[in-house]
Image: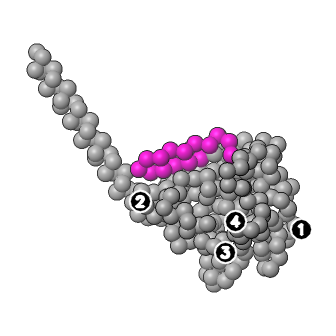
Amino acid sequence: MGNMFMFIITILILTGVTFAIIFAMYMILTNFTPGQSKVQSDVEKMKSEIQPWMEELVEWRKEELNLLSFNNINKQIKKGIVKTAKGILTSIYQEPLIAYSFKQYFGKKKNAVLYARTADREFQYRIRDKAVAVSVDGQLLGLIQKDGRLLDPETKQLTARISRTDDELTLPIIIKDREVAGLLKPIAGQPLSSTDRAFEFVNQMEPADEELILSLSIWEILRKEVPLPVLEEKDFV
């Protein structure tokens, strides 16, 4: 009886180990170099996972840009074969403004997708080593380069840029040679208050400016919040 019991236990353990190996191989193979259909399928799942948060987002008005903070609530990060993250960026009054979900595919290089949503717009970032393709409401807006430049997807001409300087407290956002906003740069080792504004200033904007400012700012804030490969992070500094 004892031998039979040990035999059954051994079979169960071997079955479990085999299943774990097969599952790990499946996860690696399906998340190694995903095609466009796989990425879009994942984005739909990411949307559904944060749908309850999206329903709570406050109405987005032009004034909300001045009220956006670095405060990241409901933040969840899972690190495994496939790394994921999600959370909500709030206003300085703790109102939920931007919900996001992130997925880093298997591998040491940047191969990820970030989905972010305000009450009235959705932003999708396809993150690769050379550039980050950003789309707004399903339309490709541009390619964010490692140095913060946003290029037109067709002409590759400069559309806007966020200037990452070492000696300034703000990161200027420049559109057509106009400095339209200044995103605050968190000081290393200094914790941020939930009431700290993300922007030091936002100048008078043209109608199309807000979309460009948000596209660059959401990426600039969240790229340091999500689990991108550590060895590659220097590429985006």
Q: What residue did someone put label 4 on?
A: 216
Q: Secondary structure at mark 3?
A: strand
In the image, residue 67 lies in the stretch drawn in magenta = no
Inter-mark Cα distance, 2 to 1: 43 Å
Left or right: where 92 falls relative to 49: right
Magenta span covers which residues?
Answer: 72-86
The earlier-in-sequence mark between 4 and 1 is 1
Q: Is residue 146 above or below residue 85?
A: below
Q: What residue did someone put label 1 on?
A: 204
Quadrant hosting residue 171: bottom right
Q: Nearer the viewer, residue 149 or 63?
A: 149
Q: Secondary structure at mark 1?
A: loop
Q: Secondary structure at mark 4?
A: helix
Label at residue 149? 3
Inter-mark Cα distance, 3 to 4: 9 Å
Crowding near the residue tagged with mark 3, few <14, some 14–19, many ≥20 C-alpha atoms within 10 Å:
many
Comparing labels 3 and 1, the label whose residue is closer to the camera: 3
The earlier-in-sequence mark between 2 and 4 is 2
